[in-house]
Amino acid sequence: MSGPLSMELSPSPSGLEEEFKTVFTRESLLFLHELISMFDEEVDQVLRLRMSRKAHFDLSGDLPNFLESTSHIRRDLAWRVLPAPPRLQRRHVDVGDLAPCDTQRFIKALLSPAQGIQVDFDDGNCPTYFNQIKGIHNVLKAVHNHFPNVPHISKAPVLMLRPRAWNMVEHNMMVEGKEAPGPLFDFGLLMFHCGKTLFENKSGPFFYLSKVESFMEARLWNKIFVWTQEKLGLPLGCIKVTVLIENVLAAFEMEEILYELQDHSAGLNCGIWDYSASFVNKFGHRQNFLLPDRSKYVNMEKRFLRRYMDLLVQTCHRRGALATGGMAALLLPQDPLSDSHQRALASVTRLKLLEIEAGVDGFMVYDLGLIEPMQKLFQLHTEGDNQLHQLRDDVTVTPDDLLSMPSGGVTLYGLKYNIAVGVLFINAWLSGTGHFFYRGQVEDSATAEISRSQVWQWIRHQTRLEDDSRVVSRRLVTALTHEVLMELSVSFFRAKQRLNTAADIFLEVVLKRDFPEFITSYLNQDHTFLSSQDFRQVEALEADIPRHKL
């Protein structure tokens, strides 16, 4: 006979007592305990596997390649993923980076003409206890039609739920003496409260999976889905997931990832900034992987990114899976007749047309004003619900294609831009938000990752500025960080101390001898972030998650 269950849960954040009671019922906690106990050791194993692979590349000097051990999966042309359900067949434009704790924006998205919403507990969300509970409760309200004047869940944009990635833990729950894995906390509560209703309404449960690095991680997720469906009395294969290929190692295992998730796959997604940052994460100490200034030399037209997108589309469509592109982060100026509005729209249109021509079946936008123009773009340039018929047989992608760094240098503008984005992201986290606005676009943990990664790498390789040949050094980065602080402090006159703290943490991160793997993991373990949560919860409650618009 088994012993008593060991589970500890922090009390409710101030102001969320009713939501806390709804989310954490005796039944949901028993389910979470069983889910986490069942898979906790395997979560640790996939994280150890990541460390092992990184150590192998560091020690051997090897480069990634398509795996010999799984070549039989790639050579077998017969297998396919199960067809996507009707509500996923036509998803040209999703709203991206939507942190569901932001009630007002969540409701606006539910009322929008978008075909889907990326309900984001990861990149665009700051995972405070307050935000996780508020966000999960808001999803529950949307699914059970408790928001007034919002379409029924079967008619609203489909919810693509994105739990946290494997690297994140939930500090407020202990299971059998260990902090709970963040993704199992999010996934378990969302499935327990919403899975059955979503399925009954033919609207889910659908998920995005972040930062998957290997087919072994996909295999673990598949086991979790099978167990969960059985436990909740749902049919096998009703959970459908889109895996974000955000890591260079995963780009070499796309077919294997689809193969492991055959019954549950809704396809793969390609982005730009987390994927680019992963090169620094895995190979940043190598001179031949020096990534040039992203503001000038890195975009989806560059060989290493274009070929990655081509391979993703080809891989998906060959196997009957949907391929989706990244998020347009640009914000449209308010006056639709202004030149700046037209320029912004033209810029998004040009870049998204490249993705459509590559064969993607959909992509995301942040600005709700971009939904209809981008839907019209799809209607103009494609036929039918999706582009699954575009098999991209013209594509042959080699390891060299995927690993070729673009040429280019570092500009003073790009260095200061990266510093500003890194500092402002940390500042946003310290204020309880996962994204912010800067220079006409939304920035989140993906852009923060590439920003701080580039600064770390440029210091490591003592790169020279194109402008005046100064070396990117600790002294220069420290001086420029103080310069950026002076420029930003005009907008943050009431919260200057927090901004200064954010700058200190940023410098700490980019001056480390060893590259911190994820800025989100680093912050999530940081004493300053953790100790400020009580204050932030009250602040967030009063302002319903305030956002600085620069």
Image (cartoon, grey):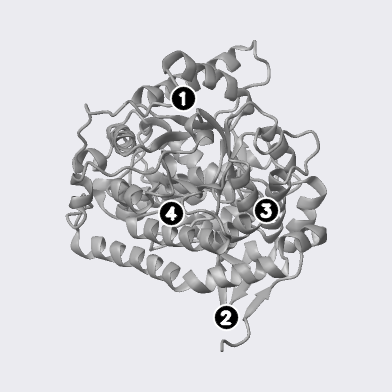
Give the amino acid at mark 3: Ile
How far is mark 1 from mark 2, CA to CA?
49 Å
Figure check: 178 above or below 396:
below
Residue 438 x/y as whole percent: 59, 35
| Quarter of the image that includes the N terminus | bottom right
Residue 440 x/y as whole percent: 59, 29
Asked whether disc 4 touches disc 3, contact meaning CB atoms under 8 Å apart, the reply is no
**Residue placed at 57% from the left, 44% from the top?**
204
How far is mark 3 from mark 1, CA to CA?
30 Å
Residue labelled with disc 2: 177
Image mark for residue 358 = none
Residue 268 x/y as whole percent: 40, 41
Residue labelled with disc 1: 385
Give the amino acid at mark 1: Asp
Count of numbered labels shown in the rendering: 4
**Residue placed at 49% from the left, 56% from the top?**
165
Would residue 146 be found to the left or right of residue 117 on screen?
Answer: right
Residue labelled with disc 3: 136
Q: Earlier in the sequence, mark 3 or mark 1?
A: 3
Q: Nearer the viewer, residue 411 or 375?
A: 375
Q: Earlier in the sequence, mark 3 or mark 2?
A: 3
Residue 12 x/y as whole percent: 76, 65
Viewer-nearest of discs 3 and 2 = 3
Q: SS of the residue at dot 1?
A: loop
Figure check: 24 above or below 263:
below
| Quarter of the image that includes the C terminus | top right
